[in-house]
Amino acid sequence: MVDAKKVKDMVAKKSSQFIGNMQGGGKVPPHKHCRICQEPIPVKADPRVCKQQECIEKNEKDEKNQKTVRIMMFIFFGIFAVPYLLVLVTGLF
Ligand SMILES: [Zn+2]
């Protein structure tokens, strides 16, 4: 399900940013966007989030989730790869 209100808010935020850039002489200083709330943040910001505690925490959680997913993928790959390799080896000899 797509949250229509959320999308609308995001579009409004994006367009207001665009207008803001236009008023600023069309030149956009190099910047990044918070990966959680899409607020403009300095290029050197690391991790790529704004200073809001909520975003920092969410980002940390996401990174932990990504790590878990990666580990799970390795485990699953191992589970499937080992029998396959065994078949391959026993088939060859
Ligand atoms: Zn943020």
Image: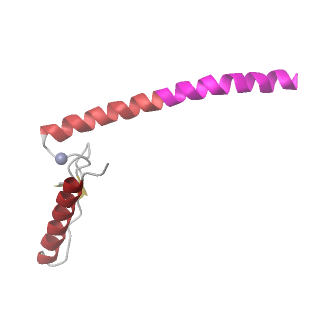
For image coordinates 14% across by 67% down, the residue present is: 16
Q: Residue furthest right?
A: 93
**Which residue is pictured at 53% across the width and 28% down the height?**
74
- Say above or below: 15 vs 87: below
Which residue does the image show at 24% across and 63% down from the upper left? 30
Name which quarter of the figure residue 5 lies in.
Answer: bottom left
Relative to 68, is 28 above or below?
A: below
Q: Is residue 59 left or right of residue 77?
A: left
Quick one: which residue is furthest to the bottom in this view?
25
Q: How far across and how far down the image is residue 36, in percent?
A: 23, 46
Image side of residue 69 versus residue 26, left or right: right
Look at the image and tell me whether residue 42 can be seen: no
Q: Please name the predominant secondary structure of the magenta segment in the image.
A: helix
- Magenta range is 72-93
Q: Position of residue 81 (x, y in %)?
A: 66, 27
**What residue sits 59% from the left and 29% below the top?**
77
Q: Quadrant of the C terminus?
A: top right
Q: Position of residue 51 (x, y in %)?
A: 13, 44
Q: Does the stretch in magenta take in 85?
A: yes
Is residue 61 shown left or right of residue 20?
right
